[in-house]
Image (cartoon, helix red, strand yellow):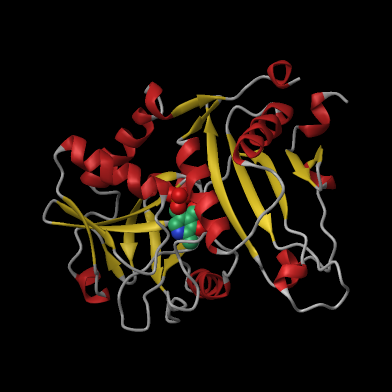
Amino acid sequence: MSSSVYSDGAAYVRGQFVPIAEATLPVTDWGFTRSDVVYDVVHVFDGCFFRLQDHLDRFELAMAKRRLRPPEDRTTIEAILHRCVALSGLSDSYVAMVASRGKPKVTGSRRPVDCENHLIAYAVPWVDVVPKDVQERGAHIWIASNPRVPDASVDPTVKNYQWNDLTSGLLEAHDAGFDTTVLCDAEGFLTEGPGFNVFVVKDGRVVTPDRGSLHGITRQTVLDLCAELGIEALVAPIHRSMLDEADEVFLTSTAGGVIPGARIGHRILGNDRPGPISLRLKQAYWSKHEESGHRTPVRPLEAEA
Ligand code: PLP
């Protein structure tokens, strides 16, 4: 098969590599009927994975927490990710790994242990949670009226497909003419948004929520960068009232990096443009991609044969 059939993306599903459009699931798969999956997303930038081992660590931990055991081990999963990207020929790519509960061996069984867990992986062209032109002008961020699902109900540190609350926030944001949304918990503390963590900057200090959030790899990169750049940073409770005082707000995601905000709710931040600390961290984030420490070059197809 020529690699061009994979140019929209390549997937691994039910043990086979297929063009992305042919990657399908049975409708009885609990990954579909129950959102019973854990997943992770790593990006490939300029032909290299960024922090691949950190993404695999988080994926393994999530699978263990949800008792999902697909047949492929870590080394095999890593090789599958390389092969998906190599087949696609993409040098900038959004690369997902998903462990699904699967479908029960006994039709109609309600017992998770009866399900055949399986791995899905795919590489598709680069995805930004917020379009690049909006990143440039600074995102207009809505504060959702609905709360984030409680941590005790759905563990936010396990990357999952329970997105109803996030999607409700997005619908509301788009109705109001905003680009995206952040959610607070029922007690009014800031959590995260659809596909990203959130940071608030006040008096030169950078803070990200200590609750209701995925331990984002980009969030960690920003915390590391703050330490390197001598910017005070902390993980702490952020009440929504702090948004009335914030100097800057920015979002972080594998799908886009450091994304400055220009407005939060009905407040205009600074001069309605990305703020200086957000821009400094954004620039430092992309510079990190040039350092060898976190880069893993995608293995060419011949190397996998
Ligand atoms: N929060 C949620 C709900 C996410 O889906 C994501 C994923 O992209 C993030 C935060 C950011 O995590 P990371 O920086 O690891 O991509």
230 lies left or right of 38: left
Establish if 282 lies above or below 219. above
Pick whichever, 178 or 128, lies toward us. 128
Residue at the spot x=39%, y=61% of the render? 140
**In the orientation shown, which residue stands out farthest toward the front?**
113
Residue 246 x, y percent position in the rendering: 20, 63
Q: Quadrant of the N terminus?
A: top right
Establish if 28 lies above or below 228. below
Residue at the spot x=22%, y=76% of the render? 241
Residue at the spot x=30%, y=34% of the render? 284
Residue 128 appears in view: yes
Q: Quadrant of the C terminus?
A: top right
Pick whichever, 134 or 236, lies toward us. 236
Residue 64 x, y percent position in the rendering: 55, 58
Residue 181 x, y percent position in the rendering: 44, 67
The quarter of the displayed image where residue 168 is located: bottom right
Residue 130 appears in view: no
Residue at the spot x=30%, y=49% of the render? 274
Tally the numbered discs. Answer: 0
Residue 301 x, y percent position in the rendering: 72, 21
Establish if 105 lies above or below 144. above
Establish if 232 lies above or below 295. below
Pick whichever, 162 or 241, lies toward us. 162
